[in-house]
Amino acid sequence: MQSTTPLPKLIRAHVFITGRVQGVGYRYATVDTATQLGLTGWVRNLPDSGVEAVFEGAKEIVEEMVRWCHAGPPAAMVKEVTVEYEHPEGLRGFEVRR
């Protein structure tokens, strides 16, 4: 008999983070954390001193990553996190974009 365990629902979160989030290792900590969680996507610095990221994966794991964004790495001082949910594109890997 085959297992009927449902596959996890995949989602995409497009996240914008403001505060002291550049020059504190935020992008690289994001890559490490997202990779450890098994997410795909990317992260980059923005000209306005913010950080932008996209996370794709199982709903619960993406939500865990979004919660992490509210604190970030130890040197970060996050002011605001804005999230827009979009349709997943099927990204592969996780990278820093420039």
Image (tube, helix red, strand yellow):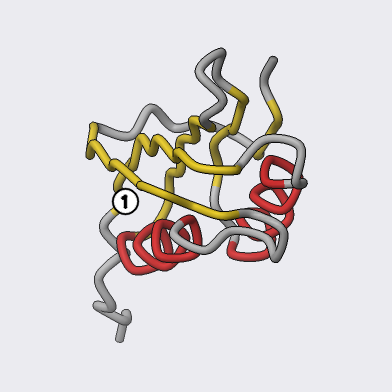
- Please state if 41 lies on the left or on the right of 61 as rendered: right
At numbered mark 1, what does the secondary structure look like: helix, strand or loop? strand
Against 94, is 89 above or below? above
Say few, some or many: other residues with alpha carbon within 10 Å of mark 1 (under 14 / 14 to 19 / 20 or more).
some
**For the point 30% across and 60% down, which residue is it?**
59
Q: x and y percent of residue 74 in the render?
A: 70, 65
> To which quarter of the image does residue 64 belong?
bottom left
Q: Which residue is mark 1?
A: 10
Q: x and y percent of residue 88 in the render?
A: 33, 34
Against 88, is 66 above or below? below
- Please state if 5 lies on the left or on the right of 58 as rendered: left
Q: x and y percent of residue 19 in the render?
A: 50, 42
Q: x and y percent of residue 17 in the render?
A: 44, 40
- Please state if 11 lies on the left or on the right of 36 as rendered: left
Against 62, is 13 above or below? above
> To which quarter of the image does residue 93 belong?
top right
Closer to the camera, 97 or 80? 80
Q: Quadrant of the C terminus?
A: top right
**For the point 49% across and 35% down, which residue is it?**
53
Tally the marks: 1
Q: Quadrant of the N terminus?
A: bottom left
Closer to the camera, 92 or 78? 78
> To which quarter of the image does residue 83 belong?
top left
The amino acid type, in three-letter code, at marker 1 is Leu
Closer to the camera, 76 or 1? 76
**For the point 49% across and 52% down, which residue is it?**
78
